[in-house]
Amino acid sequence: NDNDDEVRDRISLYTNALNKCVDSAPAADEGFQALMSTEMPFSLDALYDGLVGHMAAGNKDELFSVSALPTEAAYKATMQAQAALQTETTRTPGKPGKPGAPAAAPSAQKEAEQRATANAELMRVLGEILPGTELGQLQHTCKPKPLTESEAEYTVQCIKHMFKQHLVLEMYVSNTVQGITLEEVCVKLSGLEPCFAVMGASSITTLGYGQNGSAYVVLNKLGGQEVAGGVTGTFGAALRFIVKEEGDDLGFEDDYPVENITIAIGDYLHGHALPQKGQFMSVWEQLGASGVEQTTKLVLNYKSLEAAVEGILASLNMEACDQTGKVEAGVRGHTLLLSGTFLGGHMCLVRALVGIDPTHGCVT
């Protein structure tokens, strides 16, 4: 008759897990790792958002799975990428701010509000595009990728929202032409097959001078089971809209080509630092015993080790471990240690041995 029921339950749970691990049950070993971990394998904020979205979608009779929830680092980076696009630009009267240039860093309260609503807003938009269709949990959001020059009359950035079986492209458009209004701004993609197929899309109704807006395209991955959902490809992209000048009620239809969109393996990765410094080698050995290791030799188009390290970090979207993100002066070789999570929350580690070859230049 005491209040230590929770303590006894925990002791019973841990004792049972230890006994099963002693009995060499493979499934128990995996559960024991997660049970004894000092950090959750997913973001609690993402869990909250996911539960809210699950209840709002009317799926109360279906079990909610945490397997697709992003890690804490992936969730924070997703919120930062979305907040950067939602932040109001700084303007003087009569002059628009530079497209894509955010104002001063938001306060902690505002950032928390944006983080709490960003996922729900994205899900709301997707619900309008595909009513009744469940895409699952958002894995992470990639950093915005410019598809036009910053001085272009209409600037376009592509933000990739990664799901397990789907990919959502958000085309963030800014109108910098005074006296021009764009209407019915939509995205046209070409060369998607055989990797992707369009499921649905949305358009920007009106985009006046100095305004920003987003048009979305939802893609379904075709195949990809053999690469754990990491479907890659390159396809053409263009905007189609109606251009109206001041005093013109009719306007005319126009196509606006932008750079090709590339989906690379790095888009399915997100940096996730290891809990402790100096832990890379021990985790590498653990993953080596249960995972799959692959060795690849590449010739890099970089003139220095420093540039190569920065390029690898940017391409793979991973986190440098044990202060290996910096190259010592005067060396001709460097070992870069990287950690991150792959689509579905799978941990991924990389050892990149970068050196200068007299014949081929920078190699890894």
Image: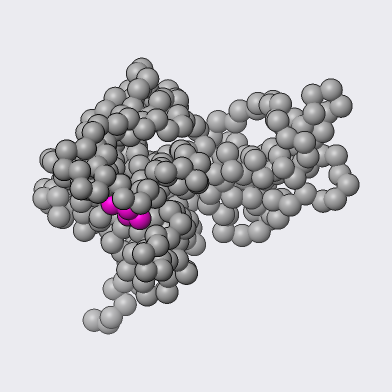
Return the x and y of residue 208 as percentages of the image width and height. 28, 51
Q: Is residue 285 magenta?
A: no
Q: Residue at x 35, y 59 (%)?
A: 86
Return the x and y of residue 237 as percentages of the image width and height. 38, 29
- Residue 212 appears in the figure: no
Q: Residue at x 46, y 32 (%)?
A: 259
Q: Quadrant of residue 238?
A: top left
Q: Residue at x 82, y 51 (%)?
A: 328
Q: Residue at x 86, y 44 (%)?
A: 331
| Extreme residue in the front direction | 247
Front residue of 11 and 335: 335
> Is residue 250 shown above or below 32?
above
Q: Quadrant of residue 113?
A: bottom left
Q: In the rendered view, does 239 fall on the left or right side of 337?
A: left
The magenta region covers 207-211
Return the x and y of residue 167 as percentages of the image width and height. 34, 36
Q: Quadrant of residue 359?
A: top right
| Extreme residue in the bottom direction | 2
Front residue of 100 and 309: 100
Q: In the rendered view, does 157 fall on the left or right side of 207?
A: right
**Count the marks: how many?**
0
| Extreme residue in the top direction | 194
Magenta span: predominant SS is loop
- Residue 236 appears in the figure: yes
Return the x and y of residue 65 as percentages of the image width and height. 27, 47
Front residue of 125 and 336: 125
